[in-house]
Amino acid sequence: MKVLNFTWSLREDVDSIDEITGERIETQRNKLNEMLDNLKEKLALLNGITVINNCLDECSGKYEIKDLNIVNYIVSNSMTIVIMKQGRKTTWNDVYKTVNSIKSAKYNLV
């Protein structure tokens, strides 16, 4: 049995650490959860496809490139999703198209 995993990321550049607020982080997390709900609805129309796991990760913070003296402040969250396929009625290409209809991702088929 093969599974597909991928990560959706949302990112917003801000001007200072003070702009990385709980409200901005929560807004992104809610958007990722809405995207997941939308994906589940679309996958339910396909045969033998199940989301077996998802995980939210907060990646917000201050990022520095010391050699270039560059500092970036970023509000960023990501969600890793794992999908399982059973049977042959639905192809992995059908699944890719469905995921990409919401947001493109880099896939890892295991």
Image (tube, rainbow, N blue to C red):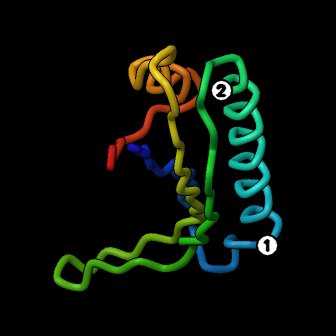
Task: Answer few, some or many: residues within 10 Å of disc 2's Cα (few below 14, many 20 plus, some between 14 and 19).
Answer: some
Residue carrying label 1: 22
Question: Could you say where residue 63 lies in the image, as x and y percent from the top left?
Answer: 41, 77
Viewer can see residue 14? no
Q: SS class of the residue under badge 2? A: helix
Vertical arrangement, residue 75 with respect to residue 66, above or below = above
The picture quadrant where one finds residue 16 is bottom right
Relative to 1, is 29 on the left or the right? right
Amino acid type, mark 1: Gly
Residue corresponding to mark 2: 43
Residue 80 in picture, x, y percent from top left:
53, 56
Residue 12 image position (x, y, % from top left): 57, 55
Query: Mark 1: few, some, or many residues within 10 Å (few <14, many ≥20)?
Result: few
Q: Is residue 19 above or below residue 3?
A: below
Q: Residue drawn at (40%, 25%), measured in percent from left and top?
A: 92
**Residue at image point 76% right, 27% down:** 41
